[in-house]
Amino acid sequence: MKEDDRRRKLVVWVAQKVMPHEPAVRAWLARSMVAREDIDDLIQEAYCRIAALDSVTHVERPDAFFFQIVRNLLINQIRHARVVRIDAVTEVEFHELHDDAPSPEQLAGDRREWTRVRRLLDRLPGRCQQIFEMRKLEGRSQREIAAALGVSENVVENESSNGLRMLLDALRQEGEQVAGEYQARRARRVHHP
């Protein structure tokens, strides 16, 4: 039971403290000219690394922690690539994280991001949303959810997977939109100094 409690707390922590920062990380990766498929892989690998942690009590800034994991994965990917674009290396080298406490603006932005993720969760179909929240936010087992809802564990597994896929697709689409808007603003600045 202790392990279930730990997993449940980790899932809630990720949902509240990490997932809201995913669009910003995706936008940074897009600005760094990382391929869309690679962005998805980097984000997924970062979540896997976080899921493997025994504890997150040492993490003071979840946004910086998440970004650093993705950044390290990208650096590792660049190191192992046969051909490396110089602009990708330059972007990674010069993007430094600050260990300062989050500013009021950043806290407000974080709240906005959680609201956005919550809004996306609310768009999931009824049972899918209920199962996804029970599984991913509350950390309940498939067996517990199946018993509580009177459905099979396969239904729980499928609905949970569908919910995660739909949520990640929505986050990716919004991240791409943000990246596109950033690129458009950047292009306007270049052409109209």
Image (cartoon, helix red, strand yellow):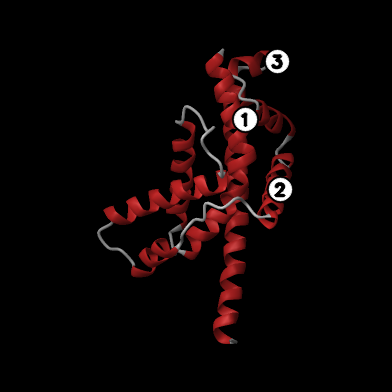
Image quarter (top left, top right, bottom left or bottom right) of the N terminus: top right
Res 184 quadrant in image: bottom right
For the question of whether residue 166 can be seen, the reply is no
| Cα–Cα span, label 3 and label 1 | 15 Å
Question: In the rendered image, which residue does mark 1 sit on?
Answer: 159
x, y percent for residue 127: 71, 29
- Density class for disc 1 (Cα within 10 Å; few <14, some 14-19, many ≥20) is many
Res 136 quadrant in image: top right
- Mark 3 belongs to which amino acid? Ala
Give above or below for 12 relative to 74. Answer: above
x, y percent for residue 6: 55, 22
**What secondary structure is found at the residue carrying circle 2?**
helix
Question: In the rendered image, which residue does mark 3 sit on?
Answer: 148
Q: Residue at x 39, y 62 (%)?
A: 93
Question: In the rendered image, which residue does mark 2 sit on?
Answer: 111
x, y percent for residue 133: 67, 30
Give above or below for 41 relative to 97. Answer: above
x, y percent for residue 185: 61, 74
